[in-house]
Amino acid sequence: MSGRARLALSAAAATLMASCALLPLVSPMTWLFQAAFLVAVQTGVGAAARRVPLARPLTVAAQALVTLLMLTVVFARSHAIAEVIPGPDTFRYFGDLLQQGSDDVGRYAIPAPLTPGIRLMVIGGVLVVGLVVDTLAVTFRSAAPAGLPLLALYSVAAGLSDGPSDWLWFVVAAAGYLMLLLAEGRDRLSQWGRVFGGAARAPGGQEGGAVAPVRTGRRIGFAVLSVALFVPFAMPSIQGGLLEDAGAGVGVGDGNGGTISAVNPLVSLRDSLNVDEDRQVLSVRTSGNADVSDLYLRIVSLDDFDGTTWKPAQRHITGVPSTFPTPAGLSGDVRRTTVKSTISAAGWYAQDWLPMPYPPSGVKVAGTWRYEPVGMTLVGDHGQNTRGETYQVTSLDVQPTAEQLAAAPEASAAMKKEYTQVPSSLPSVVARTAKEVTAGSANHYEEAVKLQDYFAVTGGFQYDTQVQVGRGEGAIANFLKQKRGFCVHFSFAMAAMARTLGIPARVSVGFAPGTPQADGTVSVGLKDAHAWPELYFEGVGWTRFEPTPTRGTTPSYTVSDTPGSSVPNETLPSKGASTAPSASASQSESCPAQLRRQEACASESAAAAVGGGDGGTPWWQLALWALGALAVVAVPLSPMLYRQRARASRLGAHDRSPAGVAAHTLAVWLELTDTVWDFGIAPDESLTPRKAAARIVLLGSLDPAAGASVHRVADAVEQVLYAPRPRPTAGLADDVRRVTAAFNGTVGVPARLRALFAPRSAVRVVWAASAGWARLRVRVAAARPTLRKPSEQRG
């Protein structure tokens, strides 16, 4: 086996060994066998392309094309042209599968089931890493950088897994990379000769093992691997690191703590919400005479604003306390009542956060849950969710007065530092509009009420689930300009504007008040999904506002005194306000992939929000445009690629037999004449090689060294053509390279660029195609039966 083939096998093996780190994440492990087969085919295509040989970019392109075809056959055969060739529908289906896989990753605990989406993500990821590793290590002969994609593959698995055998997968992945480095080193050493490449022999003629350089490399690799494994255990002051368990948190503690780095809850919501059917999500029964028209169920608060979207910040989590502490900022002067609620979640509704009234003071729930003290929320641990759960929540119905809110002192410096930050990239129109709307306000309470009324009453905004405000940092500015949106647009914009005024603000996601039932319960459905801003007032704490028109209920403490204003009815439940959900997922981003394939998704909704997609051009169409642009670039460069490929083939290695030497000599002469042709000296087939060489030296004004190289090649050609026993001449390829360098040094920049990008000799491709067409016509004519007229003579 050649060194290049051994290196290719090592690259494939290293990829598969690193991908073994994904085994604890997905069950069953049958995907690994399929991935191994596809990686083997990918490696074989690369080996065949290099043996032809194709140019390096063409080799990578061939492997990428075959990889795409294999993924099409395995995952999207029914959506492909002739069940093999990917088309627009194929890429659209791939997008649906990837979306489904992303949803499944967020839904399932480890190990996740091998759904079609997760299967595509895992196998496709392994194939992409395998292509990059093969390209770096084998095609471009640089195995060391190939460790980066291998490390990325291992890091993804290590970041998600929390199993006790993580160290084993590190050893396997590191051993694969070490094997790849050794294979490359052996291949490089073998090029120095038998002393380094051959195997040492022990007395008696038997194999004595690897030679000294290879043995030294192995010892170094094993030593480094041992250091990586055992030094962290020997140094207890080092916390975390490559082999640290991942999961609920990083740090030290008794097991009831840690940190949580949660994903955007809108993504979690969209996994469970079905915009086409208003199914019941939760059933709530409250004690006493609680006002259910104002009973919001909060899932989680979003307090990290990066200018594009809001998301939960990384917070420390603890075990669930028996009694929750008093909410931050709530003083004893504010009126409050205790409400006890029994909440039952639907058996199909799987939410990582526990929906609860705010602020909660206690909860009784089965399963494994963790408590986040800052947001006073509960989040499931190790795959725990709300599916089919029934739990009891004790909460406070805080009833501040407008006077108490108006008299609230400034928040603490720490509170303002954390909850009034806005990125410098936020468009200036946001802060400017906030100042214009709240002009003349005496305190933060009046500013908050004016902001709420601006969105809900006086600003001319309309509730619209079909609006597209775009994505990124300009989305809030677009929303303020268009004045159309749904609950997330309103809550995101009001919270951002409040922060520019120095009011601590965050966004909460959950459910608006549901619909009372005859049995005394409240039914909370999909269309009650909602988002609203919470503003902080010292002495009252986090206070809900409702800027979204026709949604939810307007708090009594925020009724505006503006003359002529028309505040929405407080007692109007959100169920009857709109037929479209406000925090449910959009058709393009949040509708489950399976429903999108059935064209069963309805309108856009809140998950598209300020940070969501703009519903613009589909990604698969962008991909087709990118491929078209690539073709536009590749076609003009095809003459250059052809010449580079032809030059490498003509000046490359050849058979040492007499026939091989003769063929190589003639190929070198053809390359020489084509090279000078590219620089403007057309070949003259009527001249002998000697006269042609003299013509090249004269017209090219070559220096003596380059002229001698031209004549040396011509003499070798004459030997092949006329000598009875041609003598092989060494160094002909170097002679051609010397002549090429001489021409590059004598001609101007335009001539060099013309010779590189538009070589005249590339016309030989056209000539070859024309000759092939002529030969084909001759064969067809020869194969056609001859038709003869019947003779009119009679026998």
Image: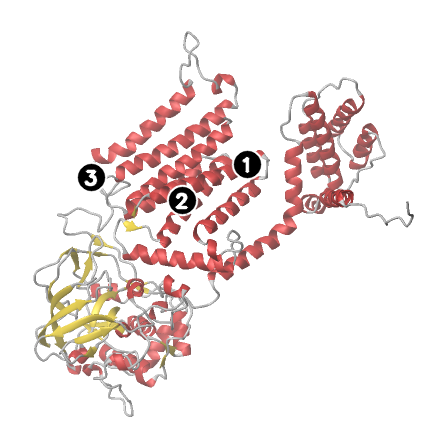
Answer above or below: position of 319 versus 763. below
* Disc with the residue nearer the chain's start (1 vs 3): 1
**What amino acid type should be assigned to the residue bearing mark 3?**
Ser
Residue 124 lies left or right of residue 24; in this view the side is: right
Mark closer to the observer (1, 3)? 1
- Quadrant holding the C terminus: top right
The mark total stands at 3
Q: Residue at x 56, y 43 (%)?
A: 57
Residue identifier under label 2 = 126
Q: Which disc number belongs to residue 782?
A: none
At label 2, the amino acid type is: Val
Q: Does residue 538 appear anywhere in the picture? A: no
Frontmost residue, 731 versus 47: 47
x 45%, y 54%: residue: 76
Which residue is labeled 3 in the image? 237
Helix, strand or loop under label 2 = helix
Which residue is disc 1 drawn over?
A: 48
Instruction: Residue 693: give x, y in percent of width and height.
Output: 80, 30
How much space separates mark 3 and mark 2, taking CA atoms? 35 Å
Mark 2 or mark 1: name the one nearer the start of the chain. Answer: 1
The x, y position of residue 661, in whole percent, is 69, 24
Q: Which residue ends up furthest to the bottom in the rendered image?
A: 564
SS assignment at label 3: loop
Going 21% across and 76% down the picture, which residue do you hit? 513
Residue 199 as seen in the image, left or right of residue 503: right
Instruction: Please state if 581 lies on the left or on the right of 95 as rendered.
Output: left
- The CA span between labels 1 and 3 is 51 Å
